[in-house]
Amino acid sequence: DVDGARFVEMHFEGMLIADDMGGPLYRGRTSVRPVLPALTHLEMTEAFEGVYNFVIGYDGNGCVELNEDAATKTVTVTIGH
């Protein structure tokens, strides 16, 4: 279960999930419950065969925006509040 009034799923395909030694490449947290005005909960729901899924729970009527930076290989999710 993910806390929040609204939900967004982030789905990534074709990802490397392990290095050459079998260690996980994603070393971030798999569950986050921050104390923020809109974002209430982020939960990793899958990390298998090149697929990562995250569910983001948030409150309010804020718009959700996704930005990718290919140079730094990062993704930023912004939730208005």
Image (cartoon, helix red, strand yellow):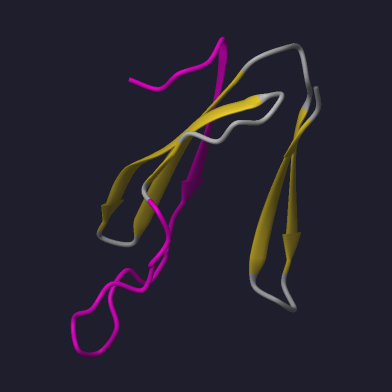
- Kindly identify the residue that appears in the image at 48 percent across and 34 percent down: 33
Q: Is residue 11 magenta?
A: yes
Residue 37: percent from the left, percent from the top? 71, 24
Q: Is residue 31 magenta?
A: no
Q: Quadrant of the N terminus?
A: top left
Question: Compared to 31, does 49 lie above or below?
Answer: below
Residue 76: percent from the left, percent from the top? 70, 52
Q: Quadrant of the C terminus?
A: top right
Q: How many marks?
A: 0
Residue 55: percent from the left, percent from the top? 46, 33
Left or right position of 28 against 37: left
Question: Compared to 31, does 19 lie above or below?
Answer: below
Outermost residue, front side: 35
- Of residues 59 and 69, the one nearer the viewer is 59
Residue 68: percent from the left, percent from the top? 72, 59
- Kindly identify the residue that appears in the image at 36 percent across and 74 percent down: 25
Outermost residue, bottom side: 20
Left or right position of 6 against 77: left
Question: Where are the magenta residues, as a range?
Answer: 1-29
Left or right position of 70 against 51: right
Left or right position of 63 against 53: right
Question: Compared to 44, does 29 lie above or below?
Answer: below
User: Which image quarter: residue 75?
Assistant: bottom right
User: Which image quarter: residue 18?
Assistant: bottom left
User: Which image quarter: residue 62?
Assistant: top right
- Kindly identify the residue that appears in the image at 64 percent across and 72 percent down: 73
The chief SS type of the magenta part is loop
Outermost residue, left side: 22
- Of residues 34 and 58, the one nearer the viewer is 34
